[in-house]
């Protein structure tokens, strides 16, 4: 997991798994991002093949942190009809996040 900054956008590039083992790393990365003057955060799932309830919870926590700051939070590069897409649909995240599928 790493960050790429492009203009006023921070892109969190997820790697293989987004689960409880990644919570400290995700917290540190998001705290770093929130110190910057950004308008959009994209969580890029193009390289991620596993997402569990802990990962969903971390996304919800990030959503709460950015909500009052006017930062747009997007979940991007989700492979349509694959495992992560199915989890996002079951969790009704489409009601909470801007989702960009490929």
Image (cartoon, rainbow, N blue to C red):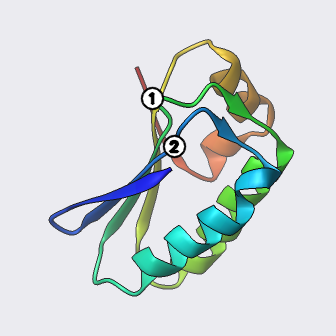
Q: Please provide percent x and percent y for residue 56.
A: 75, 49
Checking the image for residue 12, the label placed there is none
Q: Quadrant of residue 39?
A: bottom left
Q: Please provide percent x and percent y for residue 100.
A: 43, 34
* Residue located beneath label 1 in the image: 46
CA separation in Å, label 2 and label 1: 7 Å
**Which residue is painted at 74% across and 39% down in the image?**
92
**Residue toward you, 94 or 81:** 81
Q: Please provide percent x and percent y for residue 2.
A: 43, 54
Q: Secondary structure at mark 2?
A: loop
Checking the image for residue 14, the label placed there is 2
What is the total number of numbered labels drawn onto the structure image?
2
**Which residue is painted at 52% across and 84% down in the image?**
68
* Residue 36 falls left or right of residue 100: left
* Residue 38 falls left or right of residue 61: left
Q: Is residue 56 above or below residue 62?
A: above
Q: Quadrant of residue 64?
A: bottom right
* Residue 20 falls left or right of residue 66: right
**Residue toward you, 54 or 39:** 54
Are discs 2 and 1 less than 8 Å apart at CB? Answer: yes
Q: Secondary structure at mark 1?
A: loop
**Which residue is painted at 53% across and 16% down in the image?**
80
**Which residue is painted at 45% across and 79% down in the image?**
32
């Amino acid at each position: 997991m790493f960050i790429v900054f492009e203009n006023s956008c921070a892109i969190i590039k997820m790697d293989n798994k987004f689960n409880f083992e990644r919570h400290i790393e995700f917290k540190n990365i998001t705290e770093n991002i929130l110190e910057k003057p950004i308008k959009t955060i994209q969580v890029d799932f193009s390289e991620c093949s596993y997402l569990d309830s802990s990962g969903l919870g971390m996304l919800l926590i990030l959503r709460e942190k950015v909500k009052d700051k006017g930062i747009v939070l997007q979940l991007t590069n989700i492979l349509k009809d694959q495992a992560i897409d199915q989890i996002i649909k079951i969790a009704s995240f489409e009601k909470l996040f801007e989702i960009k599928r490929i």
